[in-house]
Image: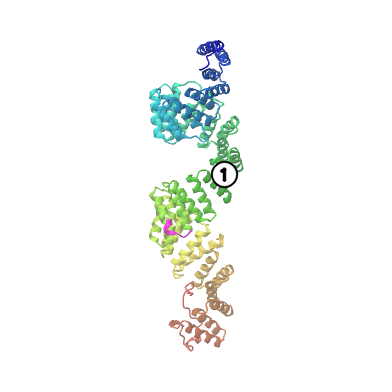
Amino acid sequence: NMAQPSIDDKRKAKEASDYFNAGKNHFRNKDMSAAVEAFTQAIMLKPEKAEYFYNRGNCYNKMGETQKALLDYSMAIRIDNKSAAYYEHRGMCYKKLGNYEESVKDYTNAIKLDTKNGNFYYNRAISYMCLTPPDYEKALDDYNHAVEFSQAKYRPLFNRGNCLRKMGKIVESINDLKQAVELEPGKSESHNNLGLSYLEIGKLEDAVEQFTAAIQLDQGVDTAIYYNNRGLAYLRMENYESCFQDFDVATQLNPNDPNYFFNRGNAYLTIRNVEQALSDLDEAISLAQSIPAYYHSKGVAFQALGRKAGAIEMFDKALALNPKYVPSLYHLGLMYHAEGQHEQAAQMFSAVIRLVPQDRRGHESLGIVHTELKLHQHAVNDFAAAIKFAAKYPDAYIYRGQSYLRLKQYDLAVADLDKAIELGSQDAKTWNLRALAQRCLKNYTAAIDDLTEAVNKEPENVDFVFNRSQCYQEIGRYDLATEDLHKALELRGENDALLLYHRGLAQYSLSNSGQDGKTCELALVDLKAAVHHKLVEEHLPDCYYHIGLACANRRRHEEAVQAFTEAINLLPEMTPYIHERAKSLQMIGQFEDAIFDFSRVIEAHPKNAHAYFRRAFAYKSLGKFEESAQDFETAKAVSPDNPLLVVNYFQLRNTHVIELCKAGQEVYT
């Protein structure tokens, strides 16, 4: 037999019930203190009643005493764990207190007890959105159930639309927010959020229309954000006047929101009003010192002013607040790159890639730095990664083509540059680079066509004109090479040593090794001017050598000797320089010196018949007939098929020298 409740128990139960009902009345009348008092009395009489704790929890909730409410809901659940409402309300408290993991658990328990309650799914979705990081997939799934099970569809549609925008599913987001607007056209928040989704996909006029609707509907505390958002849309439309008007209103309506100053500062940066930008960014920082983006934008402003140290300091501040703040890592990389600190730049771009492996610009920038460091295979790999994550951008193909060019993989370079052009590159350097690859493949017609296209796109670009001149030079069109070099010198100025040197070479070739005296003289003027204007050391020996050749072929052998000597001083082991000086020394009667130089040539090339032949004449001039005869015989033995080397000693008596070829035409094997 069950024990019957005593009279005292019955009295307590009746008393508790009366207090409970009184509490509910006070609650309905919004007298929360009295309600709490009544529910407390009921709990003291009957502490095993879950609903008493639950109702007192509701009072505390209304009074904003969330922690007390949470304890009461927990007591209710401990007594009765089969009520969905108890879990729901405790979940709400956890959400208010920022404990979203526990909130999710409570809503999950509520859903287990009531699987078709749209409100539970809706609130759990909000908690999923608030997790760190947010779980958008689970939130979306819950919003789908909330839309299905809720009678009032506005809230679930509105929030699902925002969730979809954060997931990048903009078209679906717009559909939901449009429905929300249709359900409650008087709610400014849905117009605003629909505007944000339009902004995301660049439907700027539609965005402005929705922000304007939000502004017209709401003249309250939120209006500032609607002006701010419309300002952002106008900024993207490059309607700067309207953009600044809206940002001005936003900052006036709410001068305590740093974001409005930040956005206006960035707008000033866009129009290059850097001082005004700095003023706004300083205001934003003074209102909120812990936002990395504010310091970052200030760094960008300093960058624009060329204040490199200031820029680096700001990017460092942003990274001190958030070491993973990608924009500052990226810009620091750009700064280091600009300063020539390529190792540090590579570190920054590598950090960007670690944080955002699919960041095209990170891979591309790292590739550019590796190119500077001459790590061309690394650069190829970087550009390949950039292409993998964004195959429709021509730039990575251009850069990779350039790296292939440096690696002498010319076919691959051409293929990449073809692709860049196919993807719509209009950059003249694409054609220039492809021409360089074609030139290395000896496809001169294709190279010249590409360079002509590059020159047409950028007629003032000296490099393109110069590169075409080199193609013409290599196919023997010295006239067209000279023409291009005239143009290049007109563009860059007549004192450019490198261009003068190359025009000198082209004109020397055009003179047919000095046969055309007038053109040869023009070549000499250019080559001497190149020396005068400090031609780079790399080309200086060859420049002196060609001055020597031009002089020798014009019979100005003393000048030729001087020029060849300058060339030899710079490159002492260069056989052609020594050989040509020997020949010119011989022509001016310096036979001992000539013999010394011919001997050096023979030492380097023991089978050079021409050197033996010319040395034989030098010995003859000095009366050393035995040595002379020996050299004539050796020349004939070394090159038995050359009829020019067969001599009649008797007829040679009055012959000073026989020239076998023009200066510069000797052959070495």
From the viewer's side, name the closer residue of 642 and 386: 386
Q: Residue 328 at x, y = what percent?
A: 56, 41
Note whether 323 is above or below 381 in the view shown.
above
Name the kind of residue labelled 1 in the image. Leu
Q: Residue 3 at x, y = what percent?
A: 53, 16
Badge 1 local density, few (<14 within 10 Å), some, or many (20+)?
many
Can residue 245 be seen here?
no
Q: Residue at x 52, y 66 (%)?
A: 542
Within the magenta stretch, is there residue 427?
Answer: no
Question: What residue span does the magenta drawing correspond to?
Answer: 407-413
Note whether 298 is above or below 631 in the view shown.
above
From the viewer's side, name the closer residue of 366 and 560: 366
Colour setting: rainbow
Can residue 126 be seen here?
yes
Residue named by callout 1: 332
Q: Residue 212 at x, y = what percent?
A: 43, 25
Within the magenta stretch, is there residue 408?
Answer: yes
From the viewer's side, name the closer residue of 582 and 368: 368
Q: Residue 290 at x, y = what percent?
A: 59, 34
Q: Secondary structure at mark 1?
A: helix
